[in-house]
Amino acid sequence: MARTLIRASHVIAHQNGGHRHLKDGVVVIEDDKILHVGAGYDGPVDETIDAKGKVVTPGFINTHAHLSESPLDKSFVEDRGPRQFYLSGLFEFLTARDGAITEEARRACIAYSMPELLRTGTTTIMEIGGHGDVVAEHAARCGIRAYIGQGYRSGRWLTANGRTVDYEWLPDDGEAGFRNAVSFIERIEGREGGRIKGFLTPMQIDTCSEALLRRSADAAREMKVPLALHVSQSVPEFHEMTRRHGCTPIEWLEKIGFLSERCILGHCIIPGESSWANYQADDIGILADTGANVAHAVWVFARRGIAMESFARYQARGVNMTIATDTCPQSMIEAMRWTSVVSKIVDRRTQVATAADVFNAATLNGARALGRDDLGRIAPGAKADLLIWGGESLFMTPLRDPIRNIVFSAAAEDLESSIIDGRVVMRNGVVPGYDPVALGREVQKGAEAMWAGMKSRDWAGRDIEQLSPSSFPAFQG
């Protein structure tokens, strides 16, 4: 058994049910677990890491991401949001994008995402997509802890006129996709010493039938795996579900027995009580009472002018709020920062959605959502998933409260090392085997192919410049 001692000026340790700030402390790792946390350690060790002037924190648990496509949002979706669809880009932009992405581009995005996630604090990722084997391959290669779900659904949304949302339904009600998702979990569950696991993820509430959702909930319970679903993520979806069922999306999920502590619901940003919906309901109360978890990905909405009302309100009601990136940048640093700031703006209150609140959401709450009391904390017996931050950099100085500095001031360059399962997977900002420049070139190539292919995929035959005009016109002459 190998033992490593980390001696740091600041350790965010776990004690008495919560995070605590330990100054001038040590963390001792034995193999893949934390053996000891405290002011000192007298036992034998095989290696010592000197983190004087630095900060050691738990790694972040990113509960909702789409690695095969999110990098391709750059230079495309920003500053765009059709008013006809209440600013949501789902029905025009995602349809044009997804239809034009090549297999090569998706593989390039997955490879590119690994160092992006590790360099910005993610040590556990929940990946939703259709290229799970590629994700598993890279997770094994780079050392990240990965929960991987193969998405499936009963049908798909589309717009044929840019004014209304229509649906096309599969003859088998998504049965083939569901069976594929189940067999995928059975095939990859527990790889890499348990570091790679699976979960079930019917895609969107409005593209899944009641039968498919019930089948998914039953299977997740039997297989003892997490269950994810996109819900309450747009006003058109909200209206569609109230039209179908005469109740809110979340009320309907409660009626059909879908909600439980196993559920990790993507977004839930437009509940009935939201001003965007203006539909009297206690959706937030339902989430709290059923134990369902929310994966909050603030940036995908905030960049379009849509805000959850509000993170602090859900938190106060008792909903287990977790943090996710969903789109680019795939940075948990940015996700925590924007979660805090946007909630303060919406509530017009400073002392809500604090640095501590969002840090808890990115660590302890994410672990709770996964049913893992061995993640998200630095405590004896927990998995050795740790981050080492520079404490004497341009962005981290002066340093009194490490959590406030990380949430409100840190840059990716301040995260020096990542340790997962007791193994250093990133050192001095470098993820071995991943060349960011080369990966970026492959993503650029994939993006250019996607941009060129959008015209044939868009309902109106628009090219990339018509769908998403450049910020400035081209220089002439």
Image (tube, rainbow, N blue to C red):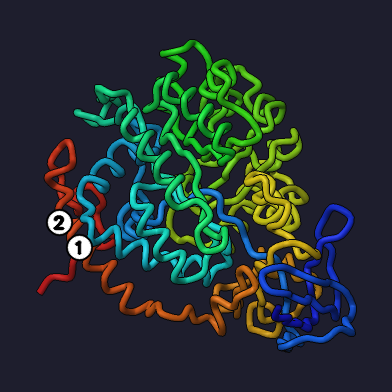
- The residue depicted at 23 percent of the width and 63 percent of the height is 446
Disc 2 marks which amino acid? Answer: Ala
Which residue was labeled with disc 1? 448
Q: Quadrant of residue 31?
A: bottom right
- Quick check: 72 left or right of 355? left
Query: x and y percent of residue 327 in the render?
Result: 43, 53
Residue under label 2, please give it: 452
Residue at the location (53% across, 37% down)? 227
- What is the x, y in percent for residue 146? 51, 57
Q: CA distance from mark 1 to mark 2?
A: 6 Å
User: Is residue 477 toward the left or the right of residue 377 in the image?
Assistant: left
**Up-down relation of residue 279 to residue 349 (above or below):** above
Q: Amino acid at mark 1?
A: Glu
Residue sitting at the far left: 477
Which percent across, then down, holds residue 20?
84, 63
Graded by Cα atoms within 10 Å as few (under 14), some (14 to 19) or many (20 or more), the crowding at tag 1 reads few
Name of the residue lying farthest toward the front: 1
Residue pictured at 81% horizontal, 74% vertical:
400
**Is any part of residue 435 visible from this angle?**
yes
Q: Badge 2: few (under 14), some or many (20 or more) residues near its Cα, within 10 Å?
A: some
Q: Are marks 1 and 2 in contact (CB under 8 Å)?
A: yes
Residue 413 relative to residue 395: left or right? left
Q: Secondary structure at mark 2?
A: helix
